[in-house]
Image (cartoon, grey):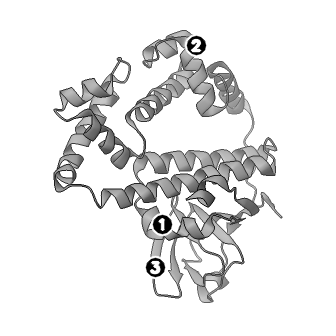
Amino acid sequence: MGNVWYSQPRILFFRVRDFENTWTEHPHSAIHNELLYVLEGKFMLEFHDGSRFPAGAGDFLMVRSREMHRDVFDPSRGLRVLIVQFLWDGADEFFELVNNHTLRELDFTTRSEITRRINFMYDKWDSGEFDLFSMNVQLHGLLTLFYLSAERSRLRSAETPELKFARPDMMRQVKFYLTQNYASPVTLAQLASRFEISSANLSRLFRHEFGVGFSRYLTTLRLESAVALLNSTNLPVSEVALRCGFSTSGYFIRIFRRHFGVTPKDYRRRERRDEERPGRPPEDDRFDF
């Protein structure tokens, strides 16, 4: 597992493309590995071995280096995709576990985080705030999230029947409880006691169902609420922290900056400045090498 974790991918091509009819009509391949993120439209990715993967806006797909495939779509409706081509020493190890079947099974939390990150890359590069090294780091983060999700799916298939039976209904209740009580000082032990399950099993269920541990899930929930308040109110940062369940404003600011790269105050200022800026015309090409 060393190459997946310790070698960094190198982006060679990063561009939004409006797909062409010829890609539907004729099998083709890319020299390098590809990550596809569908922005608009629907299509069927068909491989030479007969496997087929439908995808629509918001979906991710992978194509290995020199893998023959067709992109089947309705030309009258169009198809726009963000294509990232890359080299990576960890690619062979990565593709032993990750494939388009596992990408279709991404849990909600992981899918949301990956979507947030790739949109962050897309927006930041367009503004000129990122250099290529930073983009490679961001891509590595995306690929390792895919890898971890596939590993969780593998472990899930081996879990006990009792745990499989307990998961769906209980975790729906847990999720609803946290959306109602995230501002309170909730702990894993308290939650486990409330739902009459051991802390260890509940911790496992969190990782299986949401792709992250309890603490990360709760923190993300609180941060999402904080963003909503920063965008929609003029409340002081200290009050936003209190309403969202953070023990102190200092801790809130540290966690917020670690997650979003800016302080809450700077985030609010930037968002409101962007709202006042005239709309930017769409562009096709971002960069390629």
Closer-to-camera residue (144/62): 144
Is residue 280 in sight in this rendering? no
For marks 3 and 1 on the same chain, the one whose residue lies earlier in the sequence: 3
> Regarding mark 1 in the picture, which secondary structure is present there?
helix
Q: Are marks 3 and 2 in contact (CB under 8 Å)?
A: no
Query: What distance separates the C-alpha of mark 3 from that of mark 2?
Result: 50 Å
Closer-to-camera residue (289/226): 289
Q: Nearer the viewer, mark 3 or mark 2?
A: 2
Circle 1: residue type? Leu
| Disc 1 target residue | 97
Classify 10 Å Cα crowding around label 2: few (below 14), some (14-19), many (20 and above): few
- Relative to residue 12, is residue 41 drawn left or right? left
Query: What distance separates the C-alpha of mark 1 from that of mark 2?
Result: 40 Å
For marks 3 and 2 on the same chain, the one whose residue lies earlier in the sequence: 3
For marks 1 and 2 on the same chain, the one whose residue lies earlier in the sequence: 1
- Relative to residue 186, is residue 38 drawn left or right? right
| Disc 2 target residue | 250
Closer-to-camera residue (247/20): 247
Q: Position of residue 220 (x, y in %)?
A: 47, 33
